[in-house]
Amino acid sequence: MPVLTLSIGSNIDAANKIRQAVRALRAEYDNILCSTVYESVAIGFEADNFLNLVAVIQTDTALTSIVSFLKRLEDQLGRDRTQPKPSSRTMDIDILTYGSETGAESGVVLPRPEIIRNAFVLRPLAELLPQQVHSGTAECFSRLWADYDKASQRLWPTEFDWQDILE
């Protein structure tokens, strides 16, 4: 069964929106593993800090169905698609990887280029899937994180109240 990895982030009512997103993902998929929640400064614009995490899901759901579900979920959580990029978000869910898929598929590029550019994606991936190899670099996530310029983006783990979501 393919492994789906998702980046989940918010900086508007962030803790509440992340709980809602994970609750909806848990209702849709049988198994979900979540990383530590990390706080980071906004990249490329001035805004409140973001909360971010990565979720790992084993699923044989078709990628087109996953993309549709995630867009609906973002919309239900108040995503305003008219805002310029980059901007504050109630919810942003990005597909990072889907099994061994590479290239453009169902409107997404896999593996997602942000994996190796953004600490808020790479660090939680290295936490959950340290030995998984990034197909674009042939390096595992733990090695990519070890080599990452950590001074380039501020990121820190944060205490997060899951309110019984992950039980």
Image (tube, rainbow, N blue to C red):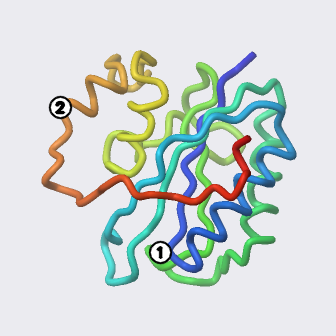
Label 2 is placed on what type of residue? Asp
At which x and y percent is residue 120?
Answer: 38, 51
Residue at (72% x, 65% y) in the render: 74
Residue at (54% x, 49% y) in the render: 7
- Can you identify the residue that label 1 sits on? 85
> In the drawing, does residue 30 fall left or right of residue 39?
right
**The N terminus: image quadrant:** top right
Pick the front one: 130 or 115: 130
Label 1 is placed on what type of residue? Lys
**The C terminus: image quadrant:** top right
The image quadrant of residue 49 is bottom left
Residue at (50% x, 81% y) in the render: 84
Q: Secondary structure at mark 2?
A: helix
**Foreground: disc 1 or disc 2:** 2
At which x and y percent is residue 96?
Answer: 54, 40
**58 relative to 148, above or below:** above
Residue at (56% x, 75% y) in the render: 89
**28 relative to 144, above or below:** below
At which x and y percent is residue 95?
Answer: 61, 44
Q: Are marks 1 and 2 in contact (CB under 8 Å)?
A: no
Sooner in the amino-acid sequence: mark 1 or mark 2: 1
At which x and y percent is residue 161?
Answer: 58, 59
- Can you identify the residue that label 2 sits on? 147
